[in-house]
Amino acid sequence: MIDTHCHLDFPVFDHDRALILKQAQGYGFESIIVPAVVQKDWPRVIDLCERNNLITLNFALGLHPCFMNQHASVDEAEVALNEAIVRSMIGVKNSEKEGDAVETIGGRLVAVGEIGLDYFIDSPEGNRQKQLALFSMQLSVAKKHNLPVLLHVRKAHDEVLKCLRRERLEKGGIVHAFSGSEQQASQYCELGFVLGIGGSATYDRAKKLARIIRQTSVESLVLETDAPDIPPAFARGERNTPLNLPRIAQAIAEIRGMDAAVFIQQTSINAKRVLGL
Ligand SMILES: [Zn+2]
């Protein structure tokens, strides 16, 4: 099982992160992907993923559209993102060269993320243009380094699809916590993207999402928790954790009328394919 989107670096996990990872290891997790949201968190995310030796934590570096007031200018951000990516990539190569057999489950950079457009948040005039400029820059950085992207999109799917058609990322990526229409779902899939599905699907009211889960090819779905956010129906109002993923996966498999073990295995294959794990 792979949790393709989990903010395990957030301070809300400081007191029991080690315990969660220990339990996740027992649950048979193959990997958890930790996407960064602001530049000041990049070292924290990298550190967490490289030092952990329980299960493989891989990371993504990017600038999230909901934190526009914390980001540098687009030009400065581009320099910083390029530098951080190159450093991460060189780091991986060095440890391989040393033939260091010790604890090489240390995670590595697998994507640019979490990036995107959020037109749902109430924001001042001009914010959308700033989001768009930052997002376009990050797409071109992903393309330059031949990396997939982890997308955060709310009320902006058509705009994001337009950007993706322009940029044509060979590696595609994951549309995390997919919330669009059936038509938008198939357009992402045509562009080589897969849909991240998690706790939202466990609510009875999520009829549209259930329809999309049934209609989308199983090769185009991956699992995620978005912990600590998006708690599933069975943990409503609580902090979400990656340990909820087995039950979330079970619920999604039921929506598809599939055996849960087969569904989990297929979604892991999909995550590995897209993220090059
Ligand atoms: Zn997120």
Image (spheres, rainbow, N blue to C red):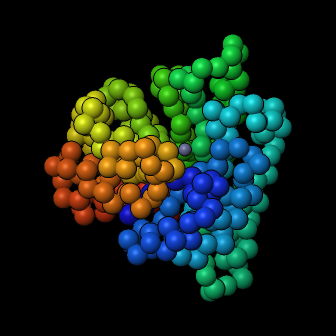
**Which sits in the foreground, 219 or 177?**
177
The spot of residue 113 in percent (x, y) is: 60, 45
In the displayed structure, would residue 174 be above or below residue 54? above
Q: Is residue 197 visible?
A: no
Q: Is residue 159 visible?
A: yes
In the displayed structure, would residue 52 be above or below residue 9? below
The spot of residue 117 in percent (x, y) is: 58, 29
Q: Could you say which quadrant of the image residue 135 lies in?
A: top right
18 sits left or right of 215 in the view: right
The spot of residue 83 in percent (x, y) is: 79, 51
Residue reaching furthest to the front: 237
Residue appearing at x 41%, y 37% in the figure: 178
**Which sits in the foreground, 212 or 239?**
239
Q: How many marks?
A: 0
Residue reaching furthest to the left: 257
Residue appearing at x 38%, y 44% in the figure: 236
The spot of residue 270 in percent (x, y) is: 38, 55
Residue appearing at x 63%, y 32% in the figure: 66
For ligand 1, the image quadrant comes to top right
Placement of the N terminus among the 4 image quadrants: bottom left
**Which sits in the foreground, 81 or 264?**
264
Residue appearing at x 70%, y 65% in the figure: 47
157 sits left or right of 246 in the view: right
Q: Could you say which quadrant of the image residue 150 lies in?
A: top right
